[in-house]
Image (tube, rainbow, N blue to C red):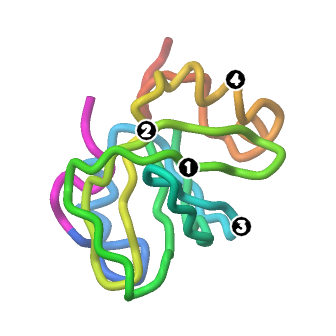
Amino acid sequence: MKTMGQGVDPGAGEGPADFDNRRQWTRRTILWPASIRLGGQVRYCHLRNLSLGGVRARAGADIALAEGTEITVDIPSRGTFSATVAWQGGPDLGLSFRDAPTRVFEQLADIAEALGLGRGEPAGSTA
């Protein structure tokens, strides 16, 4: 499974077209409140984009998490997801879900369908 950022920080925008084309999962721009948890610490953030493979979270420039750090992402009314830090660039974190894409789809239920995220198949899949 590919990580969300593949070790690359695409910057504050959605990134150049060639970066987006390397992604395994369909990605949608969102602006949702959420929180990330590492051990007993909770940090509120905003999710900037979402796919069944991960999210981009804006958590603030004062947070520093190493690539590979395992955290939990809590999305109100949607569920809790296990994730790994794929990259960090300033206030933004690329988080790769450790949960299977089919489980992420099930947790997000109606909103995943409405956003056109698929049902756990990679982007461009005909399955």
Say which mark, if any, is on residue 63: none
Residue type at mark 3 is: Pro
Whether pointer 2 and pointer 4 mark residues with C-beta atoms closer than 8 Å, the reply is no
First in residue order: circle 3 vs circle 1: 3
Q: Is residue 70 left or right of residue 58?
A: left
Q: Is residue 127 left or right of residue 85?
A: right
First in residue order: circle 3 vs circle 4: 3
> In terms of secondary structure, where does tag 2 sit?
strand
Q: Residues within 10 Å of mark 1 (few under 14, many from 20)?
A: many
Q: Quadrant of the N terminus?
A: top left
Q: Who is closer to the viewer here, 62 or 99?
A: 62
Whether pointer 1 and pointer 4 mark residues with C-beta atoms closer than 8 Å, the reply is no
Q: Residues within 10 Å of mark 4 (few under 14, many from 20)?
A: some
Residue at numbered disc 3: 33
- The magenta segment is 1-8
Residue at numbered disc 1: 73
Q: Looking at the image, which residue sits at the far front? A: 40
Identified at 42% across, 48% down, the residue is 71
In percent of width and height, residue 66 lies at 21, 62
Q: Looking at the image, which residue sits at the far left? A: 7
Residue at numbered disc 4: 106
Identified at 48% across, 17% down, the residue is 126
Whether pointer 1 and pointer 2 mark residues with C-beta atoms closer than 8 Å, the reply is yes
Please tell me in which quadrant of the rendered image residue 98 appears: top left
Q: CA distance from mark 2 to mark 4?
A: 14 Å
Q: Who is closer to the viewer here, 54 or 42?
A: 42
Residue type at mark 4 is: Glu
Whether pointer 3 and pointer 1 mark residues with C-beta atoms closer than 8 Å, the reply is no
Q: Residues within 10 Å of mark 2 (few under 14, many from 20)?
A: many
In percent of width and height, residue 8 lies at 18, 65
